[in-house]
Amino acid sequence: MSRSSRRFLPLVLALAVSAIVASAAQAGGVLGTLTTSLVGGNCGATQAVFSSWGDNHQYYFTSNGGFESGGLGWTLSGGATVVAGNETSFVHGQADGHSLLIPGGGSATSPQLCFGLLNPGVRFMATSTSGPATIHVKVIATGLLGILSVLDGGTATVGPGWAPTPIFGTTFSQLNVPVGTKTIQLQITSTGDVQIDDIYIDPFASR
């Protein structure tokens, strides 16, 4: 296979997967269920948890995404720590009572999280506790051969008062992640003191 052919092969594969997904969605039934499982349906139950803000995308709740188990599964640095006090809309549940504080220069890296074959979307609740701040999200993906890829999920401004972040990562492309990747990690950093809570992923940016 020529070098030019190898370069275009991932694009052909991605287009083929997209065509299968579209066809299965129309067909429904067993084929639709199977295809949904292949592209992201095994990540857990999904809900339109941000519908109050006009976002009807279907998200699943990430492992310890509300920090109710402390920092279990997360790698925290630069003073990042779990604190008392939940985001005020209680997106995940009224019984929740914790969130994660990331001071300026701190970072939090998630456990391995499920995502599908297409484009994952990431969204969570955030507030600034020290005036305007920014948060930056990176996605760390590891393929079957141990190949590591770090993707830029984007930056958002966070103000006072709990509110949903923008949807990070809707421009992620499977063409940019290692072959065989089925899980990702999120790395969240901040330029100011922020609290985050209730982290959700739309496994393949369902639209």
Image: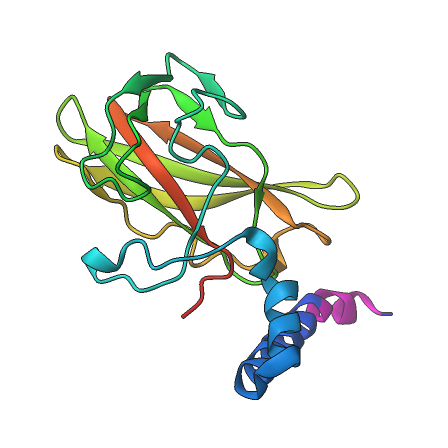
Q: Position of residue 187 (x, y in %)?
A: 47, 33
Q: How many marks?
A: 0
Image coloring type: rainbow
Q: Position of residue 21 (x, y in %)?
A: 59, 76
Whether residue 45 can be seen here? yes
Q: Is residue 71 above or below residue 41?
A: above
Specify whether residue 6 is painted magenta. Answer: yes
Q: Quadrant of residue 155?
A: top left
Residue in the picture at 31% in, 31% down: 96
Q: Choose between 97 and 147: the one closer to the eye.
A: 97
Q: Which is more toward the observer, 200 or 118? A: 200
Work out whether 137 lies above or below 15: above
User: 78 or 201, which lies in front?
Assistant: 201
Question: Residue at the spot x=25%, y=29% of the render?
Answer: 86
Magenta stretch, overall SS: helix
Going by the image, does 168 lie left or right of 185?
A: left
From the image, which quarter does the C terminus lie in?
Answer: bottom left
Task: Provide the residue span drawn in magenta.
Answer: 2-9
Residue occupying the far right of the picture? 1
Q: Is residue 182 left or right of residue 72?
A: right
The magenta stretch spans residue 141? no
Work out which quarter of the rendered image holds the N terminus and state it.
bottom right
Say whether residue 192 is visible: no
Give percent across and percent down for residue 95.
29, 33
x and y percentages locating residue 165 in the rendered image = 27, 45
Residue furthest to the front: 95
Relative to 77, does residue 6 appear above or below in the rendering?
A: below
Q: Look at 72% across and 54% down and name the residue there.
A: 179
